[in-house]
Amino acid sequence: MAPRRVGVFGGTFDPPHLGHVGVARAVVGGLELDELVVTVANEPQGKAEPPVAGAPDRLAMARAAFEGLDRVTVSDLELARGGPTYTIDTVEALLAGGREGPGGVPEVVLVVGADAAAGLAGWHRAGELAGLAAVAIVPRPGSQVVHPPGFRVREVAVDPVDLSSTGVRERLRAGEDPAGLVPVGVVLFLLTHPLYAP
C-alpha cells in the first residue's frame, strides 16, 4: 500500500482569509492528499513584524476558518512546542508523531506561496528540509513561481487569490465588511474579538 501523503500548510494566519481556504481546498484534491495539516506559527521567523493577534486567537480563527473542510486538520503543534517556529521541526514531528498510515511513514508536502518559495533555500536547515519534504508552490499575484534549488517541487493548479493577511487587516481597520474577506467562522469570531477594529 502506498504511504500516506500529508500536506503541511503553515502560516501566521493573522487572520486566515478566503484565499487560505481556497488554497486548502485546491491542494487537498490537486495533490491527492490523505490529510492537510494546517499549522499556526507560534513565533514566525523571517517576518518583518510580529503578529498582531496573539497565538491563541490565531489558532481559534484558523479552527473557525477551516472547520468542516474534508481532510483538513488544524494543529496546535507549533504553539504547544513554543519558542521560534521552524518548518523543519514541524515536519520532523509529523514524520515521527504517529501519523504513519498502513504503508509506513507519510510523504510530506509543504504548501507554500510563491513569495515564500523563492526564499526556501535560506530557511532554517533547508538542506535537511529538502530531503524530508516535497514542495507545492501556490501562485501569488505579482510573484513569479521559482523552483527552490534542491527541493522536489509538486505542481498544483490553484487560481491566484489577490488577498494577503496584511491587506485584510488594513481593510478591516478601514471598516470594510469582513464577509468578503474572511470565512464566516472568522467573521463570527471577530464580532466578539475585534482584533483588527478600526
Image: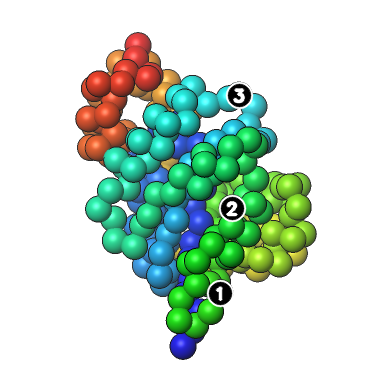
Q: Which residue is mark 1?
A: 105
* 190 up-or-down from 11: above or below: above
Q: Residues within 10 Å of mark 1 (few under 14, many from 20)?
A: some
Kind of residue sitting beneath label 2: Thr
Kind of residue sitting beneath label 1: Val
Q: Which residue is mark 2?
A: 90
Kind of residue sitting beneath label 3: Glu
* 182 up-or-down from 30: above or below: above
* Element carrying mark 2: helix
Front position in the image: 70 or 182:
70
Q: Is residue 72 left or right of residue 88?
A: left
For marks 3 and 1, give the CA distance: 36 Å
Residue 56 placement: quadrant: top left
Front position in the image: 162 or 12:
12
Q: Is residue 172 left or right of residue 164?
A: left
Q: Residue at x 59, y 33 (%)?
A: 43
Q: Which residue is mark 3?
A: 49
Coordinates of residue 68 in the picture (x, y in percent): 25, 53
* 94 up-or-down from 144: above or below: below
